Image (cartoon, helix red, strand yellow):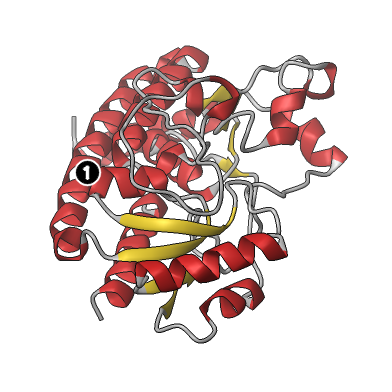
Amino acid sequence: MNRTLFAAVLLLSTSISALAAPKVVATIVPLHSLVASVMEGVGEPELLLKGVNSEHQASYSPQQIADLGHADVVFIIGDNLEVKLGEISGTDAVNGKTFVKMNLAEGVIKHHIREGGTWEVDGDEPATGNTVDPHIWLDPENAKAMTKAIAAALSQADAGNATIYNANAEKEIAALDALETEIKVTLEPDKGKPFIVFHDAYQYFERRFGMTAVGSISDYTATPPSAARLEVIRNKIKSSNAVCAFREPQFSDAAVSVVTEGSAAKLGVLDPIGAKLAPGAQAYFELLRDVTKNLKDCLGG
């Protein structure tokens, strides 16, 4: 086959693949990134939650909900993160479509929601049911399990491209292995240094990399904290000699300013969903590298 003919055949096959690509939706940037990686060469998933919005407090228009019913596959984290979507999965509102929930994926490690504003580092016991902390994507080991589940779901919906999905998943998992090693090396000198986070979103990252968060200004849902909770955190910052307190771009800085007033804690920024990142296959890696860099800059600076 001459080069011209080969190029024409390749272009035709690519066009056919693009035309045959399933309509796929993912809710948040890190999940969308994993899906985009698995779909590379077939199509592009749609990102549902765009811009600087809380993953917990997002609302969806009737049109968005109706559009989900016309998608071939919809990926969400789970019922206790995208609460509204969890409620309508499988109902008439979305044409009876059942969403693919990553917190149910085989191999995903789950931890219990931490109670109260402060805590001590505890064991790695698994969690189930309504007590599960939904921020599962911040552990790269979970991202690997999610990648496998994404490839399986896409292969079931679009068997003709299953070979591509599975090959892409293998490539993504290898890249996640390298990312995990990179982060471990980067943060090793900063283990044991206490810090406070804005909302309790980071325990999967903390446990995986041995970091020492000692409290959160808000709970895992990012609900505005009470005056009593703010006082508890103020005291914890002083008693633990917390090195840093981290705000998030999705929320006001006011509470962080209140709890750090008069303390030696430095201020930093952490973003658990990459709200300001450009969506795409590299966004998951950029997100975890940003979290790593911002921790390093504040704790080690």
Quadrant location of the N terminus in the rendered image: top left
Say which of 72 and 109 sits in front: 109
Q: In screen coordinates, is 244 left or right of 191?
A: right
Instruction: Locate residue 61, reporting x and y percent.
Output: 83, 44
Say which of 40 and 185 sits in front: 185
| Residue that extends furthest to the right in the rendered view of this protein | 62
Q: In screen coordinates, is 12 left or right of 225?
A: left
- What residue is shown at x 37% (from left), y 40% (from top)? 37
Q: In screen coordinates, is 216 left or right of 62?
A: left
Quadrant location of the C terminus in the rendered image: bottom left
- What residue is shown at x 51% (from left), y 51% (from top)? 200
Q: Residues within 10 Å of mark 1 (few under 14, many from 20)?
A: few
Res 270 visible? no
| Residue that extends furthest to the bottom in the rendered view of this protein | 262
Instruction: Locate residue 49, reporting x and y percent.
Output: 64, 49
Residue topped by disc 1: 175
Q: Secondary structure at mark 1?
A: helix
Say which of 124 and 263 sits in front: 263
State the image quarter where residue 227 is shown.
bottom right
Res 241 visible? yes
Say which of 222 and 177 sits in front: 222
